[in-house]
C-alpha cells in the first residue's frame, strides 16, 4: 500500500516538473513586475559593487 502511494506520488511529481518548463503569460508578467520593483529599489537605495555582481550572476542563471 505504501509502495503504491509512493509510486503515484513520484509519477505525479515527475509530471508536474515536466509541465513547468516554459513560463506562462502570468509568470512572465510577475517577473516583469518583480524586475521593476528591484529597479525602483536600486534607484532609491543604490547597491554596492558586491551586491550588483551577485544580482548579475542571479540574472545570468535565470534566478
Image: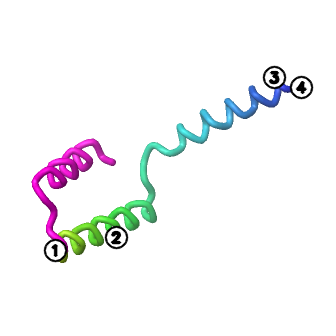
Quarter of the image with the N terminus is top right
Secondary structure under the numbered disc 4 in the rendered image: loop
Tell me if residue 53 comes above or below residue 15 in the rendering. below
Is there CB contact under 8 Å for labels 3 and 4? yes
Residue 23 forms part of the magenta stretch: no
Q: Quadrant of residue 2?
A: top right
**Residue 50 x %, y %:** 14, 50
Q: Earlier in the sequence, mark 3 or mark 1?
A: 3
Foreground residue among 50 and 53: 50
- Distance CA(mark 3)–CA(mark 1): 54 Å
The residue labelled by disc 2 is 33
Mark on residue 59?
none
The residue labelled by disc 1 is 43
- Distance CA(mark 4)–CA(mark 1): 57 Å
Numbered range of the magenta stretch: 45-63
Mark on residue 3?
3
Q: Residues within 10 Å of mark 2 (few under 14, many from 20)?
A: few
**Residue 62 x %, y %:** 30, 46
The residue labelled by disc 4 is 1
Horizontal placement of 8 versus 36: left or right?
right
Mark 4 or mark 1, whichever is nearer to me: 1
**Residue 3 x %, y %:** 81, 22
- Distance CA(mark 1)–CA(mark 2): 15 Å
Amino acid at each position: 500500500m505504501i509502495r503504491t502511494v509512493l509510486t503515484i506520488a513520484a509519477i505525479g511529481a515527475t509530471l508536474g516538473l515536466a509541465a513547468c518548463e516554459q513560463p506562462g503569460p502570468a509568470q512572465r508578467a510577475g517577473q516583469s513586475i518583480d524586475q521593476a520593483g528591484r529597479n525602483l529599489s536600486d534607484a532609491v537605495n543604490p547597491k554596492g559593487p558586491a551586491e550588483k555582481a551577485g544580482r548579475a550572476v542571479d540574472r545570468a542563471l535565470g534566478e
